[in-house]
Image (cartoon, rainbow, N blue to C red):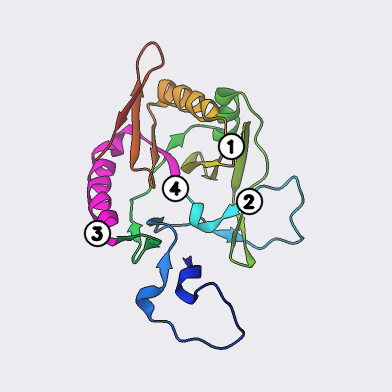
């Protein structure tokens, strides 16, 4: 979670033990989710067909039910002030931990099958999470839905509910794929889409598919 930046040590690296003040150890992301999915161990090394991402990316972009709009706006306002206070030129000297009461984002019989039909894409296996130098595990009861264009929807199922529905954005993404997914989920279930690091909340859309954006 914490990164050492090259400027702490200068350009030359040696094998000598160096003493570094804790204030010089910076966070590479300004915010993290307090809750992470239950993980299961991987029985074998992931293949090219498996999808994984760093655990710091968990729920950095995610969908929420409209009932949580006010709560999310309040958190965004608090987080914005925190981020500005703790920002330094190479990172952040503290991280804002988001604590949100989780409830069903989507709820239906056979929720993954319904999500597949809505998004027009087939669900794959659970994502795995990794940290620096090690695999943390595979998301229990998890799923992924690749939308193409380096956009992947992911989450996990609890009975007939999907408590977490996130989006992972890779390199050089086709943002229109995520916008299209939002438009479908907003129209069908009134879902919101939030990018926590960008402090951007997409609330709704007009009849001509123009999205309504809110910033703190």
How far separated are the C-alphas under marks 1 and 2? 17 Å
Q: Which residue is disc 4 drawn over?
A: 60
Residue reaching furthest to the top = 208
Q: Which residue is disc 2 drawn over?
A: 52
Residue 184 at what x, y percent from top left?
48, 22
In the displayed structure image, the side of residue 145 where residue 192 appears, left or right: left
How far separated are the C-alphas under marks 2 and 3? 32 Å
Which element is circle 1 on?
A: loop
Query: Would residue 43 be counted in the magenta stretch?
Result: no
Q: Which residue is disc 3 drawn over?
A: 85
Mark closest to the chain's N terminus, 4 or 3: 4
Residue situated in front as seen by the camera: 6 or 204? 6
How far separated are the C-alphas under marks 4 and 2? 14 Å
Q: Can residue 171 be seen in this snapshot?
A: yes
- Is the residue marked by circle 4 packed among few (<14), some (14-19), or many (20+) residues within 10 Å? some
How far separated are the C-alphas under marks 1 and 4? 17 Å
- Is the residue marked by circle 3 packed among few (<14), some (14-19), or many (20+) residues within 10 Å? few
In the displayed structure image, the side of residue 77 where residue 56 appears, left or right: right
**Residue 192 position (above or below residue 171):** above
Image quadrant where residue 205 sits: top left
Q: Which residue is disc 1 drawn over?
A: 172
Residue contact between numbered discs 1 and 4, judged by CB atoms under 8 Å: no
* Region of the chain picked out in magenta, as a range: 59-86
Mark closest to the chain's N terminus, 1 or 2: 2
Residue 40 is labelled as: none
Instruction: Indicate which label's residue lies in the foreground, 2 or 3.
Output: 3
């Amino acid at each position: 979670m914490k990164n050492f930046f090259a400027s702490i040590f200068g350009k030359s690296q040696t094998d000598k033990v160096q003493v570094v003040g804790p204030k010089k150890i910076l966070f590479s992301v300004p915010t993290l989710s307090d809750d992470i999915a239950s993980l299961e161990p991987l029985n074998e090394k992931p293949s090219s067909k498996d999808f994984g991402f760093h655990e710091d990316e968990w729920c950095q972009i995610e969908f929420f039910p409209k009932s949580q709009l006010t709560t999310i706006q309040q958190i965004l306002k608090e987080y914005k002030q925190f981020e500005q206070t703790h920002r330094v030129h190479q990172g952040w000297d503290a991280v804002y931990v988001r604590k949100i009461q989780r409830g069903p984002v989507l709820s239906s019989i056979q929720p993954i099958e319904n999500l597949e039909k809505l998004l027009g894409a087939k669900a794959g296996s659970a994502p795995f999470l990794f940290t620096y130098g090690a695999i943390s595990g595979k998301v229990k009861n998890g799923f992924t839905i690749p939308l193409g264009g380096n956009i992947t929807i992911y989450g996990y199922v609890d009975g007939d509910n999907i408590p977490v529905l996130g989006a992972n954005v890779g390199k050089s993404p086709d943002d229109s794929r995520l916008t299209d997914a939002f438009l479908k989920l907003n129209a069908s279930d009134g879902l919101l889409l939030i990018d926590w690091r960008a402090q951007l909340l997409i609330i709704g859309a007009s009849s001509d598919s123009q999205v309504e954006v809110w910033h703190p």
